[in-house]
Amino acid sequence: MATQVCLIRHGETLWSLSGRHTGRTDLALTENGERSAAGLRARLQGIPFDRVLTSPLQRARRTCELAGFGAAARIDPDLSEWDYGDYEGRTTAEIHAGNPEWNLFNDGCPHGESVEQMTARADRVLAGLRSMEGTVAIFSHGHFLRVLAVRWIGWPLQAGRHLVLDTASVSKLGYERPGSNVPVITLWNATAPTGGIVKA
C-alpha cells in the first residue's frame, strides 16, 4: 500500500464561500481560490510524489494544475465530491428548515448518494491505493476527503462529521512508524500561513 497519502482540498469557490453544498455542480475557483491553490506549489514542493490523482471536477483539477502537478495527474471519477442529490446548492440551514434532524454523515442525501454508497466508493479508492507504492497526492473535495480519512484508519464513515477541512488545506495519511501496518492520520487541515511548507 502507498506509504503516505497527501490529501489536498480544492481552493475556494463561490459556493464553498457561502456554505452551499457543492457536489456535482462544476464550479470554477474564485480569484482568492486561485491564489490559495497557487500557494500550494511552494508548500508541497518538497514532497516527491510517485502518483498524483485528481477528481474530474474543475475546482480540483485547477487546484492540482496551479499547485504544479497538472501534467502528472491522473483523473479518477471516484474522487468526486458526495452527490448531494436534492440538497445540491443548498446550505445546511436551508435543509434544516425542512428536515431539522438531517445530518449528511448519518443520512446521506435524497436522490443523491447514501452513506453506504459513499463508504463503498471511499473503500474502492483505498483498494486502489493498496496497489500503489510510495507517496500519493489526491486533489479532491471536503466531504469526500473526510470520509476517505476515517476509512483509512478503519473507522465508520459517520466519524467524518468530527473532522473539519478548509479549502486549499493539506492533510496526510500514513502509518504509526516505518514498517508499521497501523494506519494513522499524520497531519490534518494544514492551511497557509500556519500550515507552512508541508514536509515529506
Image (cartoon, helix red, strand yellow):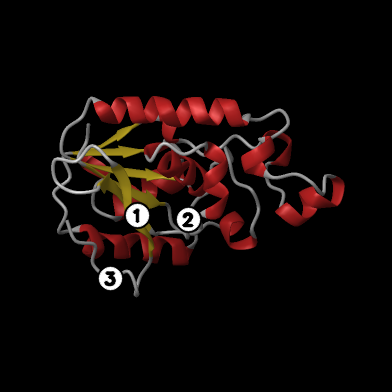
| Horizontal relation, residue 19 to residue 154: left or right | right
Residue drawn 65% across the image and 37% down it = 84
Q: Please state which amino acid type lies under the numbered disc 1.
A: Ser
Residue drawn 26% across the image and 46% down it = 174
Rounded to the nearest whole Å, what is the CA distance between mark 1 and mark 2?
Answer: 20 Å
Q: Secondary structure at mark 3?
A: loop
Among numbered discs 3 and 1, the one appearing first in the sequence? 1
Specify the farthest residue to the right: 98
Q: For the residue carrying disc 1, how many other residues have a C-alpha within 10 Å: few (<14), some (14-19), or many (20+)?
A: many
Q: Where residue 78 is drawn, which disc sits there?
A: none
Compared to 165, does 103 lie above or below? above
Q: Secondary structure at mark 1?
A: strand
Q: Which residue is mark 2?
A: 29
Among numbered discs 1 and 2, the one appearing first in the sequence? 2
| Viewport quadrant of the N terminus | top left
Q: Which residue is mark 1?
A: 171
Residue 147 position, x and y percent, is 48, 41
| Horizontal relation, residue 95 to residue 54: left or right | right
Q: For the residue carrying disc 2, how many other residues have a C-alpha within 10 Å: few (<14), some (14-19), or many (20+)?
A: many
| Viewport quadrant of the C terminus | bottom left
Among numbered discs 3 and 2, the one appearing first in the sequence? 2
Q: Secondary structure at mark 2?
A: loop
Q: Where residue 196 is drawn, which disc sits there?
A: 3
Compared to 124, does 80 lie above or below? below
